[in-house]
Amino acid sequence: MVQGYDFSGSVQAWQRAKRVIPGGVNSPVRAFGGVDEKPVVVASGRGCRITDIDGNEYIDYVGSWGPLILGHAHPKVVAAIQAAAQRGTTFGAPTLAETELAERIVRAVPSIQKLRMVSSGTEAVMTAIRLARAHTGRDYILKMNGCYHGHSDCLLVAAGSGLAEHSNPSSAGVPRCFAEKTIVAEYNDLPGVERAFEEYHGRVAGLIIEPIAANMGVVLPDPGYLKSLRQLCDYHSAVLIFDEVITGFRVAYGGAQGLFGITPDLTCLGKIIGGGLPAAAVGGKSAIMNLLSPLGPVYQAGTLSGNPLAMAAAIATLDLLVEGDPYGQLETAVAQLQAGIEDAARRTGIAMRILRAGSIMSCYFTDRPVRNLAEVKATDIALFKRFFSGLLRNGVYIAPSAYEALFVSLAHGPADIEKTVEIVHKVFEDIRR
Ligand code: KE4
């Protein structure tokens, strides 16, 4: 299985990084803690491929965890950034580009009447939570186990032993009193949500969910689940927040809410709406969004919010997503990839199932259904790690964790998909040996 890949440059660079950066990385998942490999240090990317500092090339299915639906260094995106940079990189003042991007997003996502740009998905979610609490005058937030919404304190919580049990902090440094205001139910467990609303009757400010989960691996909502959450939030006058940081402009131009026809009160966006640069947004009903300073009493701010370079990258990206039939093209590519991997698993006798939503998917080593975090954890994680290593050492780069998604871009052409399937088949055969 192991090709002659030389990782020595990455190993040295990572050792050097660890002397000045905790774990040698600026985001934990990049440290490869979920797999039995050391991180590769990336030198460059173009289209669907990245090259590490040892010169090893990979077909990339991480795509920076979602932003790069066009692939790396798309010429039109790079040109837009360069042109914007020539005019100055940041002003801390309103620019037309912020309005032009906001208008595009409002047109694409009907539930968003107004939006506020921020610099990360974490900030978008943090602001959405604050808005929900201000709008309702309530304190409790309901989230689903296995969904990740960034690293703001109140969302770094682990499910208590039961709904009645308060949640516990899932990170050091989060006061118990913060975690206690967050209730955790299981994804796809509607009775659990109903019980939570009853248990905390009149005290739930909002429910936040990834409408298609992608941070426990890709897990799909049961038919009718999202509609029922909408009805429960209406009944209990709670704010329904869709965290579409991954799914926004990814599974469809109008996001998961467009696919399912569900209207949340607030939406969090990120990744693709930054075009590869730091930008995210919280948006929704004007009645709620107008609570934001300077109009209303909810304070929120950011030095680089609406940064001109990110706006230029985002506008170039979104404009390319309305040219031709990009989502049809993506569907063709991903369907080919899914079919090829499933065929390779069948032919090598490996129990595997793929859950997919548009151009995000996860490969689970199991022959059982996967509908929530516990069922993801019950899959063969050790086998996933062998799958990851085999792919990496044969030139395919997927997320270094069984609890993440594969991201396919418009730069993944038929030949890249065929090559990937060929390598997957080889890796499955090596695993079977
Ligand atoms: P950021 O603060 O990382 O921009 O966004 C946080 C966030 C919010 N909501 C959802 C649904 C998300 O997926 C994320 C961040 N996603 C992870 C990958 N699963 C980012 C990768 C990382 O943490 O390095």
Image (spheres, grey):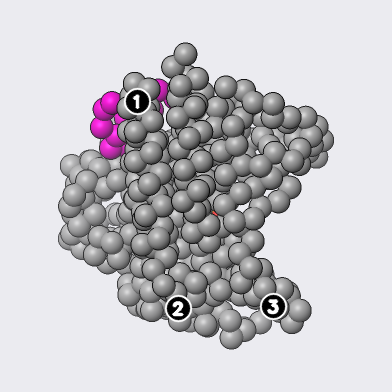
Magenta segment: does it hold 375?
Answer: yes
Q: How many marks?
A: 3
Query: Where are the magenta residues, as a range?
Result: 367-381
Q: Quadrant of residue 284?
A: bottom left
Q: Which circle's residue, 1 or 2, is located before the other in the chain?
A: 2
Label 1 CA crowd tier, 10 Å (few <14, some 14–19, many 20+): few
Residue type at the position of mark 3: Ala
Q: Residue at x 32, y 27 (%)?
A: 346
Label 3 CA crowd tier, 10 Å (few <14, some 14–19, many 20+): some
Q: Quadrant of residue 351?
A: top left
Q: Which circle's residue, 2 or 3, is located before the other in the chain?
A: 3
Residue 84, numbered circle = 3
In percent of width and height, residue 62 lies at 54, 46
Residue 238, numbered circle = none
Residue 69 versus residue 177 in the image, above or below: below
Residue type at the position of mark 1: Arg
Q: Quadrant of residue 89?
A: bottom right
Residue beneath disc 2: 104
Residue 122 versus residue 93 in the image, above or below: above
In percent of width and height, residue 204 lies at 30, 54
Quadrant in which the N terminus appears: top right
Residue beneath disc 1: 347
Q: Nearer the viewer, residue 52 or 203?
A: 52
**Which-is-in-front pick, marks 1 and 2?**
1
Residue 57 versus residue 320 in the image, above or below: above
Main secondary structure along the magenta-highlighted residues = loop
Magenta segment: does it hold 389?
Answer: no
Residue type at the position of mark 2: Arg
